[in-house]
Amino acid sequence: MHDNNKTVVVIGAGPAGLSAAYQAQKSGYHVVLMEKTGIAGGKGGSKKYKNFTVDFGPHAYHAMTKEITNLMENHSKGNLVDINIKQKLYITKKPISYPMKIKEAVLNFGIGLNIKILFDFFVSKTKSIFIKQSRNSFKQFGEANFGKTLYDLCFGKYTERVFRRSSDDISVEYARRKLPNASLWGFIVGLLTKIHSKKDRESYLHVRRYMYNKNGIGNTYQEIAKGIIDRGAEAIFNCEISNIVVSEDNKVQSVNLNLPEKKNIKCDYLISTIPIDDLVHYTDKKITDHNFNEKKISYKHVVIVNVILDKPRLSENHWIYLVNDQFYFNRLSEQKNFSMNCAPKNKTLIMLEVILDSVDKEWRWEGDQWRNKVEKELGFFNISSKEIEDIWVTRMEKAYPLFLVGYEEVKNKILNDFAKFKNIISTGRYGLFLDVNMHDAMVLGAEGFRYLVENKVEEFYKDHKMVCIWKRNQKS
């Protein structure tokens, strides 16, 4: 596989792109790494703000395979450590642990609500015996498997608030990915016995080994990028792509950049980890007939409202999911709980996350415009306005794929079109329109490269959903 005369261009220096670039370089190819921002790490990056380290999240690393975990550890200078993740859900006014404990959940919900949950569940199960029900949407799947009361309480209303879409519009595939044990009965059995089905164990929800770089997870990705550059790769940051040149015989030839001066980068292979619609937009030859205005393949933006509090700690939790309808934000995280190195001893940094579209007025809000919403939300946690020292915003475009009913058929059509182009591959979370963690994004980056140079692009698009599971099941 070694060929130092051939160039692999990698678009995007996030987890998938860095993993692809690392594997390409390791295999003897000349690598050109392109990144539109000024820093490696993508959505897994970190930056400094005053005397705080701030992630775009923050994100823990799911240690799932030896190969990727070794890559992370080898570029962390001994700073990648195991962490015991603590998470809470606010479904009612009182928090419960996540993953849920059966006794805690039952006590939290109260007798009346528990009776209603069980009654609705048995009604839905009885109905399903006599009437064949469609399960194409998140709502249909959730109500059939959990009953209307539990579904609305824990999943349905929260999902609609998060994505600002009816759960009738959201695909059943998102439900299968996000809802643990896939039914109330399986949920109860799992909670009581801690025995999970094979399919359930494949979900990242049951990966219990998390790791974090004490100086911010993005620090590891910056070290991976530095190593790639030190070994001879060309890295172009703050890079704006003008167009990708594709020949008549369906091969990528070069990438044109808008730098202070125009630049043409010739390539033998192209690995794209950017959103599918961005790749299509850049290519000068039509590589799919899909019209993205149909919105079946679309992404949601995220705003992280970063808040410095003049107190040592808000809670012991890494993430708090704000499920109750009284909240505006979707999730709260506390950077200091991932590593004490990320904040001074006497202060803490919390992050309030909300999913938006570019047409939403809040998408453009700056720090202090968020103050009323921040004060109201944090007032619930007994934080006074005097304790709020600073507010600023991190915007992340196209952070979440939006899985609408019917998206899979459209996605498969697009990937079939892409498969005609033998020296281009689209991979990673955004390039394959998947909801995966950093580890799986890195697997898809590395495996995408291998399939590409082995002339198996079509097979990769057919296999991509199983690739991460296969790698996890391999004996290390």
Image (cartoon, grey):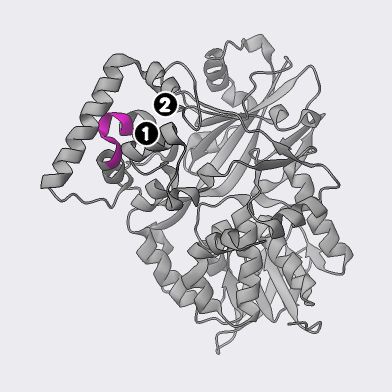
Q: Inspect the image, locate mark 2, and give the three-letter code of the amino acid beneath it.
A: Ile
Q: Is residue 150 magenta?
A: yes
Left or right of 5 in this view: 202:
left
Residue that mark 1 sits on:
188
Does the residue at mark 2 contact the one at mark 1 (Cβ under 8 Å)?
Answer: yes
Which image quarter holds the C terminus?
bottom right
Residue toward you, 318 or 123: 123
Q: Residue at x 81, y 53 (%)?
A: 75
Residue toward you, 144 or 232: 144
User: Percent position (x, y) of residue 59?
Assistant: 65, 41
Secondary element at tag 2: helix
Q: Which mark is residue 102?
A: 2
Q: Main secondary structure of the magenta part?
A: helix
Left or right of 41 in this view: 140:
left
Secondary element at tag 1: helix
Circle 2 crowding by C-alpha within 10 Å: few under 14, some 14–19, many from 20? some
User: Percent position (x, y) of residue 367?
Assistant: 64, 28
In this rendering, does residue 171 appear at all? no
Q: Which residues are magenta?
A: 145-151
| Marked residue nearer the N-terminal end (2 or 1) | 2
Above or below residue 313? Residue 222 is below
